Amino acid sequence: MREGGRRYVVAAPKSELKKHVSALQNSEGWKTIKKRNVEVKYATVADPDSKDLLLLCRSEDRRQKEAAMHDRFIRRIEVSLNSLARRLEHALKPVKMTLVQRQIGRMLQRNQRAAKLFDIRCEASASSPSGLALTWTRNEEEANWAVLSEGCYVLRTNIQDWKEENVWSVYIQLTQVEAAFRIHKDQLDIRPIWHQ
């Protein structure tokens, strides 16, 4: 949609949010979209590399969904870490550190949304028959960012003269059209065919 000087509204990467922490924390300037539980406002700092405007969006429904997902993944990681620590404490013979590190890696990969929230250390320990000790702490900085950014996203547009509500509604229409195409492709079973 960007090519040829066309007008566009696209979702920006989640990393774009980190540049606007103060705007997310500031309660001023947010506009509520009618009949929706969504608030929007233009970022005061535009993208310096382009003339694009950035629209910050936050949705209460999306925040609740992401918070529930984070909680579920956090619980999974904690249960897995507790189980692994117990196995290492009760092991009767030495355990290879590389095997434990692989287990930790697989666990974090399965629960990627909460992986950054943990600092995990596996170290040699002479007091344990397994020869290893597993410790972990919660990364409070990442946890605070997760809470602040839950339900938030950024839209990028080159349309300078639209109100926030218009940009948001065009993006939502685009997502609905994409969803309709996905449904039709699935129901018609035409996925392997190249079509336009």
Image (cartoon, rainbow, N blue to C red):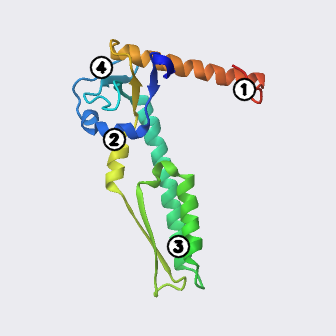
In front here: 54 or 147? 54
The answer to whether residue 35 of the structure is visible from this angle is no
The C terminus lies in quadrant: top right
Residue tagged by mark 4?
Answer: 31
**Of the two numbered discs 4 and 2 in the rendering, the one whose residue sits closer to the viewer:** 2
Residue at disc 1, secondary structure: helix
Residue tagged by mark 1?
Answer: 186
Residue tagged by mark 3?
Answer: 86
**Of the two numbered discs 1 and 3 in the rendering, the one whose residue sits closer to the viewer:** 1
**Residue 188: percent from the left, percent from the top?**
77, 22
Q: Amino acid at mark 1?
A: Asp
Residue at disc 2, secondary structure: helix
**88 horizontally vs 161: left or right:** right
Q: Amino acid at mark 2?
A: Lys
Q: Counting other residues with Cα less than 10 Å from the Cα at mark 2, is it few (<14), some (14-19), or many (20 or more)?
A: few
In front here: 48 or 92? 48
Of callouts 1 and 3, the N-terminal one: 3
**139 horizontally vs 71: left or right:** left
Q: Residue at x 74, y 25 (%)?
A: 194
